[in-house]
Amino acid sequence: MKTNRAVKITILLFVLTGCTPMPMKTWTSSPVNQTAQNPYYEVRFEPLKQNNNFFEMFRLTVINKSDKNLTIDWNKTRYVFNGHARGVFVFKGINPEDIKNLTITADTVPPGAKFSKEIAPAKLVAFAPFTDRTISADKSGFSPGVIPEGKNGIYLVIRTPEQEMRDNLTLNIESKEIR
C-alpha cells in the first residue's frame, strides 16, 4: 500500500513538474539596425524575427546613389559573429551547390535603384535534402535557425566597374526572459 502511494506521488510530481511553464524569451537588437553610406550607396542591415520571438534572418537594403551599376558580391560577403567570419549568407532561390563552390550569382543594383533581400547565415540554416520532392518552386528549400546572442554582422562587398568597396556592419543580439 505504501509503495502504491509512493508511485502515485512520484507520478503526480512528474505531471506537475511537466506542467510548469518554461520561461519564454524574446530577442532584442542594439541598435535596431545598422547603416553605412558613402558617395556610391547607402546600406541598411537589420535582423528579422518573422513570426517568432527570436531573430532568424536579416534584411539587407542597398540604395544606389551613383550613376553606375553596383554589384553585391555574395561570394566575398561574409556573416560575422563576435568578430570572426563564419561563412556566406543564403537566401530564397539559392542553389546549395553554388554555396559549396562559392559560385553564388551576384546581385546588381542599377543607378538610383533600391535593392532589398532577406538573408540568413548559411552556418545556421537547415537545408532540405536534394531528393526532397515536396519543395515547390515557390519554397526556399531551407529553414533559418536562431541568430545567436552576441555581435552579429555582415562584411559586405560591393563592386563598381572600377573598384571594390567593403563595409562591416554589426548588431548586438541579446535574449531576455519575459513573464
Image (cartoon, grey):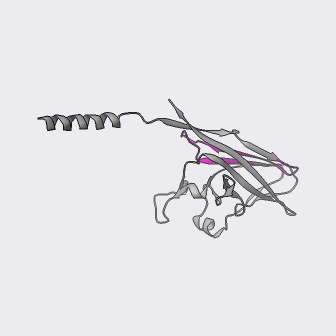
Residue 159: image quadrant is bottom right
Residue 40 lies within the magenta run = yes
For image coordinates 63% across by 70% down, the residue present is 101
What stretch of residues is rendered in magenta?
37-61
Left or right placement of residue 147 versus residue 16 in this view? right
The residue nearer to you, when weighing 120 against 30, is 30
Q: On the rendered image, what quadrant is the N terminus found in?
A: top left
Residue 160, how many percent across, how many down? 84, 60
* In the image, residue 106 above or below residue 12: below
In the rendered view, would you say 30 is above or below 82? Answer: above
Residue at the (76%, 52%) spot, across then down: 168
Give the side of residue 54 with respect to residue 151, left or right.
left
Q: Quadrant of residue 35?
A: top right
Is residue 100 or residue 149 the one in the foreground? 149
Q: Residue at x 78, y 53 (%)?
A: 167
Q: Mark yes or no: residue 141 visible.
A: no
52 relative position to 70: left or right? left
Residue 139 forms part of the magenta stretch? no
Q: Nearer the viewer, residue 128 or 77?
A: 77
